[in-house]
Structure formats: structure tokens, C-alpha cells
Amino acid sequence: MVETADGEKVVRDAVGNVLSDGNTVTVIKDLKVKGSSSVVKVGTKVKGIRLVDGDHAIYCKIDGIGAMKLKSQFVKKA
């Protein structure tokens, strides 16, 4: 998350594209789900993301896993 000169926060994906609420993103790395034996595989599409404050800037729901937060460095805009 980067803050612009006028105080607005901008979230960018792994490639540098600006993300906004409602975007569809693709996971670029296998991610272990904390507290579970599940794994979010590379290439998983996540629809309708919501941007939140904090270290994990993306809140989303993934089919078969449920609600979770992701870091923007592990996704790219689809």
C-alpha cells in the first residue's frame, strides 16, 4: 500500500497495477492457509475483492476455502 501526496492510499499488485474494490485477481504463488491443511493454488481466480487497511490489504472469499485476507504482493490483476 502506497500513500499519494494528497493522502489517498493506493494498493498495487505484484506487477504494479492499481487495484480497486470489485476487481478480479489471480494468485501467483501457492499460499498455505493458516490453521488448515488447505492450499490456495497458483492461478486461482478471486472475484470481487475488497481493499482494507493493514498488512493484508485484500479481503476476499475463495471458493472451497472461505473468507480470507491476502497480501497484494501475491496477486496480479486479471
Image (spheres, rainbow, N blue to C red):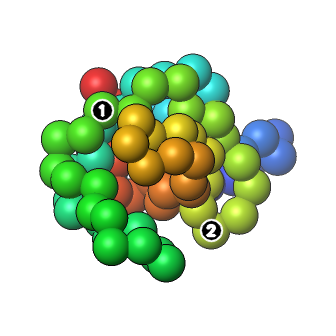
Q: Secondary structure at mark 2?
A: loop
* Number of marks drawn: 2
Q: Position of residue 57 (x, y in %)?
A: 61, 54
The quadrant in which residue 33 appears is bottom left
| Residue 48 in view (yes/no) | yes
Residue 20 visible (yes or no): no
Residue 13 on image: x %, y %: 39, 46
Residue at 62% across, 27% down: 21
Q: Amino acid at mark 1?
A: Lys
Query: Quadrant location of the N terminus?
Result: bottom right
Q: Using a 10 Å C-alpha cutoff, classify the residue at mark 1 as few (fewer than 14 neighbours), some (14 to 19) or many (20 or more).
A: some
In the image: residue 53, left or right of residue 49: right
| Up/down of 28 relative to 6, above or below | below
The reply to whether dot 1 and dot 2 touch (C-beta < 8 Å) is no
- Of residues 17 and 76, the one nearer the viewer is 76
Q: Residue at x 21, y 59 (%)?
A: 29
Residue situated in front as seen by the camera: 76 or 34: 34
Residue 62 on image: x %, y %: 44, 40
**Mark 1–mark 2 distance (CA, rounded to whole Å):** 21 Å
Considering only vertical position in the picture, is 46 above or below 47? below
User: In front: 3, or 12?
Assistant: 12
Circle 2 is placed at which residue position?
Answer: 55
The residue at which mark 1 appears reads as: 45
Quadrant of the image containing the C terminus: top left
Q: Identify the secondary structure beneath mark 1.
A: strand
Instruction: Give me the residue at 71% from left, 64% from top.
Output: 54
